[in-house]
Image (cartoon, grey):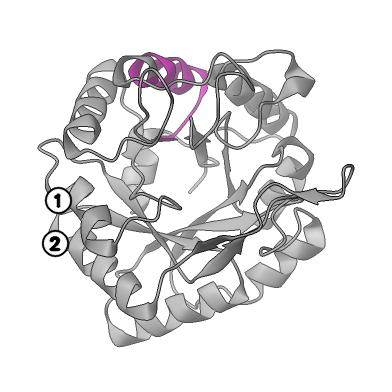
């Protein structure tokens, strides 16, 4: 498509102590989504959060409320979570989506099992040492089939070259529909994924399945800003937000402020954000 897909990762597991503008409640998420859409966001991705503690909230009712409020507030493509990293079984994870009365347009499938190993090179410490995110092939199949049965588009979240090879196999089996929406994960802090560099991204792109694909790059626990030029030049979209990084380099920004910073760079490159309807047509 002509435009660059901008996915805002609104909250993930981020605390308000890292940035008080991280939205937690459905109402906060909807207001933030509207501001992001006005700034140029194509897709908004959100996690359910407890309004007091910020703990993960995987109730279907919370998802329904959030989707309904976001859809009333703006036209951005809605993109939920399925309990990533929360330790829930696959049945519980899928139930968040299938039992929701208002469903999002996109839902993620993480392609593989990985250590959760954020490393701080300055302090030489891991913030997590026993975290493992388990997604067997059977789990990937179960979630993909359930997402499709719910009338939602699955998002292929690729953490490694192995993830992309698995995606290719699922396409070959006829399980994964095309065109594909994929999210390539890179990070300076998560050691289980490729580094957030041109070289790290190039290694992933070399193993993209031979299928029509709209792909974005997500920088886990890392700023997207240094990678914007590289991703755009390679033909990809950008997935970013306060859920991944507090963006202290921009002061104490809102998600919409971060969108504006990315859009400003896009304009300097002679590009523009993709509209939500362009994304819908591509998928």
Residue 51 placement: quadrant: top left
Q: Is residue 67 left or right of residue 151?
A: right
Does label 2 or label 1 sit earlier along the sequence? 1
Closer to the camera, 272 or 122? 122
Instruction: Please state the horizontal and vertical placement of residue 32, each as a whole percent of the image.
Output: 43, 17
* Total labels drawn: 2
Q: Is residue 157 left or right of residue 217?
A: left
Q: Which residue is mark 1?
A: 98
**Where, quadrant-wise, is the C terminus in this rendering?**
bottom left
Q: Residue at x 21, y 61 (%)?
A: 91
Q: Residues within 10 Å of mark 1 (few under 14, many from 20)?
A: some
Q: Which residue is mark 2?
A: 149
Q: Give the magenta part as a residue range.
A: 29-45
Mark 2 in CB contact with mark 1 (< 8 angstroms): yes
Q: Is residue 206 above or below residue 157?
A: below
Q: Residue at x 34, y 33 (%)?
A: 48
């Amino acid at each position: 498509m002509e435009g660059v897909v901008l996915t805002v990762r609104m909250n993930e597991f981020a605390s308000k102590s890292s940035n008080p503008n991280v939205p937690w409640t459905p109402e906060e998420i909807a207001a933030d989504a509207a501001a992001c859409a006005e700034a140029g966001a194509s897709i908004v991705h959100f996690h359910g959060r407890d309004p007091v503690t910020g703990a993960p909230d995987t109730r279907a009712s919370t998802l329904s409320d959030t989707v309904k409020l976001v859809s009333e507030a703006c036209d951005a493509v809605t993109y939920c979570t399925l309990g990533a990293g929360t330790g829930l079984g696959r049945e519980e994870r899928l139930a968040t989506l299938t039992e929701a009365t208002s469903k999002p347009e996109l839902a993620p499938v993480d392609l593989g099992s990985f250590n959760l190993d954020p490393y701080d090179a300055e302090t030489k410490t891991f913030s997590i040492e026993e975290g493992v995110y388990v997604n067997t092939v059977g789990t990937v199949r179960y979630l993909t089939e359930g997402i499709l049965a719910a009338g939602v588009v699955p998002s292929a979240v690729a953490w490694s070259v192995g993830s992309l090879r698995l995606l290719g196999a699922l396409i070959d089996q006829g399980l994964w529909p095309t065109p594909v929406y994929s999210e390539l994960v890179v990070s300076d802090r998560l050691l289980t994924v490729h580094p957030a560099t041109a070289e790290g991204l190039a290694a992933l792109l070399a193993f993209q399945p031979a299928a029509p694909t709209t792909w974005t790059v997500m920088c886990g626990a890392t700023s997207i800003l240094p990678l914007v030029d590289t991703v755009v030049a390679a033909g990809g979209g950008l997935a970013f937000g306060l859920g991944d990084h507090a963006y202290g380099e921009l002061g104490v920004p809102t998600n919409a402020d971060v969108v504006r910073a990315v859009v400003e760079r896009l304009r300097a490159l002679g590009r523009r954000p993709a509209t939500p309807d362009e994304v819908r047509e591509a998928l």
